[in-house]
Structure formats: C-alpha cells, structure tokens
Image: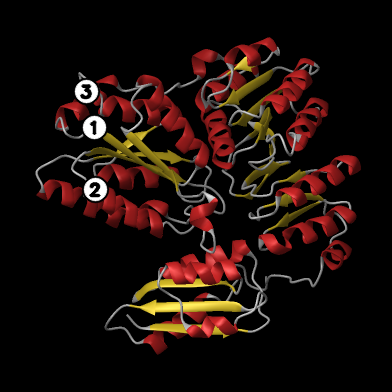
C-alpha cells in the first residue's frame, strides 16, 4: 500500500487535539490508516510497529508534527493527503468563534482572570513542567497526559497539597467540577452526591448510574490511577475526601477505585472515620470488613455504590428502576451456544468496567480463569502514540473480527462509552465489525453472542436511545450496567461442568 510521510517543523498539537485529528483523518474514504503524532522516540517506535515507518520520520524532532498516511489501492495519494490536511484545519461551529492560542500558562492566566483550573494534555515529557507552572499561578490541575514519571507525580501532588490545590492525574480522564464535565465526562444532573475516583470509566459509570437512579452529582474529582499506590500515598484521594466533607452542596461521598495499597487504605479509612457525612466505598475486589469497620457503606460494584448513594441522598427507593437481571434471556442465549463455546472475550475501552466484569466472572468460577480474557484497550500499552479507543476504535474493531474466528468463543463483550470527548457516533463505526463477526460465526454454523453495555445518559451528545437502537437492530444484546454486564456474560457461558 502507498505511504506518504509529511513532517511539519515546529508544529505542536496537544494529545487531545491529536486524538481528535487522527479520528477525523482515519474516517476519510480511501484511507487505510493515518498516524498523526509528535516526533518523539516513542511515537517513531509506534510507526515501526504499525508498518508506517519511513526514513523521512528520522528528520522529525520532538517539537515537529509527523503525518503518515497509508492509502488503499485505487485511491490517489495526493488527493488523500489534501483531504487529511483539510481535516486538520479547526473550524468553529459558531460563526466568528475561533480557538485562542497562548504561548504560555502565564499569558493564558493573564487573559482569563477568573480561571482556576488548567487541563493539561501535552505529551508526558512536558506535562510536569506545564503543571508546575499552573500551580505557581494558583491553578488547580487536571492532567489528562499520561507517561508522566512517578517522581514528578509525587512532587507535584505534594506541592499542590501544600498550596491547597488539586492535581488530578496524571492519566486522569474524567472530572465534573461545579457542573462542568472535563475531558471524558457524561451529561448528568447536578445533585448532592460527591465522588472521588482513581478510575476514569469507573467514575463515569457511577455518575451515570446515579443520574439513571434519580440522583445527581455535586462534584466528581479524579485522582489518576497511581494515586492510591504506596509511593504516592493517596494524596489526592485524601484531599478530595476533605474537600467534599467541607463542601456545602455535597451530602453523600462516594469513593471509587481498585483496592489501595495497605498503608494507603489505612489512611483512607481513618479519614472516613473522621468524616461526618455518609461515605460509600467501592474498591473493586476490596476488603469488605475493613471498609465497614471504617464506618463507610460497602459497595461491591459500581451499580451498588450508585444505589446506596442515591437512597442515602433522599431519593425514594420505590422510584428507582434497579434494572433487574433478565434471567430468561440468560437461558435463551445458553441454549444457542454449543458445548465448545465456553469462553468470554471482553474488549473494553474502560479499565474499571473491564476489571469489574472480570471479577464477577471469577467470583462464579474461582478456579477457572481461562473462560474470560478481558482486554482494556485504553491501557497505556495500547494508547502510546495512538488515540484512546473511546475516540478511535480501530484497534478494537480488528479484535472483534479476530475473536469471532475462535470456535470456542461464545460471547464478545463491548463497552460503548458516550459523553463529551468520546467518539461522536461510536456504534456506527463499530457496526461493520459486529456484522463481519456475526457472519463469520454463521458461516461456521455457530451462534456468537455480542453483549454491549452502553455507558451514557439521555443528556449525552451522541443520543443514548439511538445508539442502543442501532445495536439492537443488529441483534446485539444490551446490558444496563457494568455489574449486569459481568453477570450476563458469565451466565451465557455457564455449563453443567466447568
């Protein structure tokens, strides 16, 4: 296939912009793949791994933009190049509106006196330096950037703590501050439930379920996935708890994460004991007795955490639709799968949803781990130099087709994540792969169950009902929550003898 490499010297784009640009470019007819990235060593390695490397990229420096285009046979590469560059031109939807570009954090603050938070999405190599400048300007920081060193994270969070500021992240994908969603966030109503989360999609799932059950969010504070490690010490989780305890609009506090390290857990439970407001803790796979001993409400799953928080917030239980598990559906799907089809393949954009589904399957079959292979395609190993799968699902589309070819696979599980920052129509771009997967199975005389969990609300820009309808029209089974996704998938492949 023909490949063209374009190097734009001294042209910088942040990682969020690059994600959006890559998604737009990869949707152009005639394009096999496009990689738009800064000329870092890591990004050059990605080009080698994806077959897009040419000698021209050797001339790109860290501050240069690389555009590598691979076209399909029969399409003019000059024409494709023009279309890719046109897709990169930012156009405002509103006449007369345009992006304002500043040369420094200081200049941005000077021009926006009321600003109190900086969202940082530059490459990890530069993120700590920019974050430090933001803290010096008295700004809270949300670091969307990943690949920031542990040492820099610790230094930044200690400095922020001393200044009474937050550093959410690095690798923090979700926050809702004073009703405004930052980076990946869903449209949820405001209310009196505050959330502190060390997981992006876990935070999204809890906030969406709270909205679904009739409650609302006061604040949602992300900490980044490493915050509860022994090295970082839970600095932001602890500061987040204190901030919500002091917040007049917050009446209930929810904590969401994978289990903290032992010493950090003790600090969190001690802080919870000193908090007068009700606290619900959902540490996926966490210690139930230790959580209850702290005086907190224990939630095994994100759905249970949302239910507890909503009922504690004053929403009448009789008004809550709990979305009970469809037991007849489980028996119906089981009857379609042959004895050989005992495996689940979970292909996820969200790490917490991935972990929650896997933990529920393992709970049913504690000695059988091989019946589920969950992959978090949003993990750093899959996103180095590439857009997050919530924006560009191309890697997952390939895996859907690949897993469909395995005759022992009975269920393929997908999370479809809606909200601000996510793909504008995630179902539409996924349908061709779903159709191909089902066709592969049908030709071999077997049923393949596609189970999808649509994480979103009626306020999200992608139109939740339409996304669900498109999936159902293709015969995809819909799950109502992350918890139900795990319970349904394990029920579908349940055999008499495991």
Q: Residue at x 42, y 44 (%)?
A: 375
Q: Residue at x 14, y 32 (%)?
A: 338
SS type, badge 3:
loop
Estimate the x, y position of residue 269 in percent, counting from the top left. Answer: 72, 19
Q: Going by the image, does 169 lie left or right of 462?
A: right
Q: Residue at x 87, y 65 (%)?
A: 106
Disc 1 designates what residue?
Answer: 342
Disc 3 designates what residue?
Answer: 495
Task: Identify the image quadrant of the N terminus.
Answer: bottom left
First in residue order: circle 1 vs circle 3:
1
SS type, badge 2:
helix
SS type, badge 1:
loop
Cβ atoms under marks 3 and 2 closer than 8 Å:
no
Disc 2 designates what residue?
Answer: 404
Estimate the x, y position of residue 383 in percent, counting from the top left. Answer: 52, 57
Q: CA distance from mark 1 to mark 3?
A: 8 Å
């Amino acid at each position: 296939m023909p490949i063209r490499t374009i190097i734009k010297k001294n042209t910088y784009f942040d990682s969020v912009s690059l994600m959006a640009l890559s998604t737009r470019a990869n949707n152009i007819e005639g394009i096999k793949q496009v990689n738009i990235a800064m000329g870092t060593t890591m990004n050059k390695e990605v080009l080698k791994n994806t077959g897009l490397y040419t000698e021209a990229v050797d001339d790109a420096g860290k501050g240069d933009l690389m555009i590598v285009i691979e076209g399909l046979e029969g399409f003019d590469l000059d024409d494709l190049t023009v279309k890719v560059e046109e897709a990169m031109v930012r156009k405002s939807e509103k006449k007369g509106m345009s992006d304002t570009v500043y040369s420094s954090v200081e200049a941005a603050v000077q021009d926006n006196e009321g600003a109190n938070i900086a969202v940082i999405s530059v490459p990890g190599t530069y993120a700590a330096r920019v974050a430090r400048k933001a803290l010096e300007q008295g700004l809270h920081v949300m670091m969307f950037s990943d690949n920031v060193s542990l040492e820099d994270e610790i230094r930044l969070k200690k400095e922020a703590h001393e200044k009474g500021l937050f550093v959410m992240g690095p690798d923090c994908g979700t926050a809702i501050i004073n009703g405004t969603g930052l980076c990946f966030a869903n449209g949820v109503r405001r209310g009196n439930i505050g959330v502190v989360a060390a997981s992006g999609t876990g935070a999204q799932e809890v906030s969406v379920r709270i909205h679904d059950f009739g409650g609302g969010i006061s604040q949602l504070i992300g900490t980044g996935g490493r915050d509860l490690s022994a090295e970082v010490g839970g600095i932001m989780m602890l500061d987040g708890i204190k901030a919500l305890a002091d917040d007049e609009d917050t009446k209930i506090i929810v904590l969401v994460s994978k289990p903290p390290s032992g010493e950090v857990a003790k600090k969190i439970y001690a802080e919870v004991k000193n908090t007068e407001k009700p606290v619900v803790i959902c540490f996926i796979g966490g210690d139930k007795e230790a959580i209850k001993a702290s005086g907190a409400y224990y939630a095994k799953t994100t759905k249970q955490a949302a239910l507890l928080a909503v009922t504690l917030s004053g929403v009448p239980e009789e008004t809550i639709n709990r979305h009970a598990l469809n037991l007849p559906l489980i028996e119906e799907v089981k009857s379609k799968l042959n004895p050989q089809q005992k495996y689940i393949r979970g292909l996820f954009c969200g790490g917490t949803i991935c972990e929650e589904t896997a933990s529920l399957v393992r709970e049913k079959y504690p000695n059988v781990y091989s019946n589920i292979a969950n992959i978090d395609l949003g993990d750093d190993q899959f996103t180095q130099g590439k857009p997050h799968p919530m924006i560009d699902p191309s890697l997952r589309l390939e895996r859907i087709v690949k897993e469909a070819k395995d005759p022992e696979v009975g269920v393929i599980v997908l999370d479809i994540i809606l909200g601000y920052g996510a793909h504008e129509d995630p179902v539409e771009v996924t349908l061709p792969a779903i159709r191909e997967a089902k066709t592969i199975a049908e030709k071999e005389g077997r049923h393949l169950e596609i189970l999808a969990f649509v994480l979103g609300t009626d306020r999200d820009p992608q139109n939740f009902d339409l996304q669900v309808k498109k999936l159902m029209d293709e015969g995809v089974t819909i799950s109502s929550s992350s918890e139900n996704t795990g319970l349904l998938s394990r029920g579908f492949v349940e055999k008499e003898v495991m």
